[in-house]
Amino acid sequence: MSEFGEMIREAFLGLESFDALPGKAELEQAIAKLDRRERTVRWMAWGAVGFMTALVAGVIASWFATDGHGVESAAVHVALFLFAMSGIGMMKLWLIVMQSHFTTLQELKRTQLLTLERIGAGG
């Protein structure tokens, strides 16, 4: 199953069961999984931003290419422009929130890994 498919499955079925004492390999694997998820989210967000930017460019080009500017034509152009611009802003905000979320989870996993290593070295 692809990374995106697994993310969707986990979203609908819930997260994996809680393990109070994970091993070093599981923690390193979890950190790597979070890296892959962050990369997937980044590609999705910037793909959507690119699409919306192309839509904005198309709307602007269509506006200047049109000879007669009726009320209906202007309304459609303005609506598409505002939709695309708000989509760009929302996708950028979503990316910032998701990157913050992944960074927090990665730091928690790294702290857990460091604690596990200190316990193993001291005990």
Image (cartoon, rainbow, N blue to C red):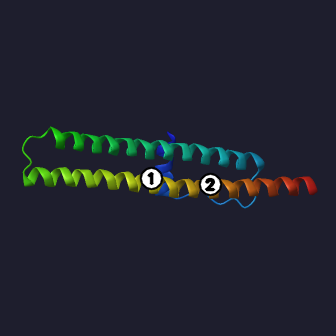
User: Which residue occupies 44% across, 53% down?
Assistant: 92
Question: Which of 64 and 32 lies nearest the eye of the viewer?
Answer: 64
Specify which label sits upstream in the sequence, 2 or 1: 1
User: Which residue occupies 51% across, 55% down?
Assistant: 96
Residue 36 falls left or right of residue 85: right
To which residue does mark 2 refer?
103
Question: Looking at the picture, which amino acid does disc 1 mark?
Answer: Lys
To which residue does mark 1 refer?
92
Per the image, label 1 sits on a secondary structure element best described as: helix
Q: Nearer the viewer, mark 2 or mark 1?
A: 1
Rendered position, 112 above or below 43: below
Residue 77, given in percent of the width and then of the height, sits at 18, 50
Question: Which of 5 and 34 lies nearest the eye of the viewer?
Answer: 34
Question: Which of 122 and 82 lies nearest the eye of the viewer?
Answer: 82
Is disc 2 surrounded by few (<14), some (14 to 19) or many (20+) residues within 10 Å? some
Residue 15, given in percent of the width and then of the height, sits at 56, 57
Total marks drawn? Answer: 2
User: Which residue occupies 7% across, 51% down?
Assistant: 70
Question: Looking at the picture, which amino acid does disc 2 mark?
Answer: Thr
Question: Which of 26 and 49 lies nearest the eye of the viewer?
Answer: 49
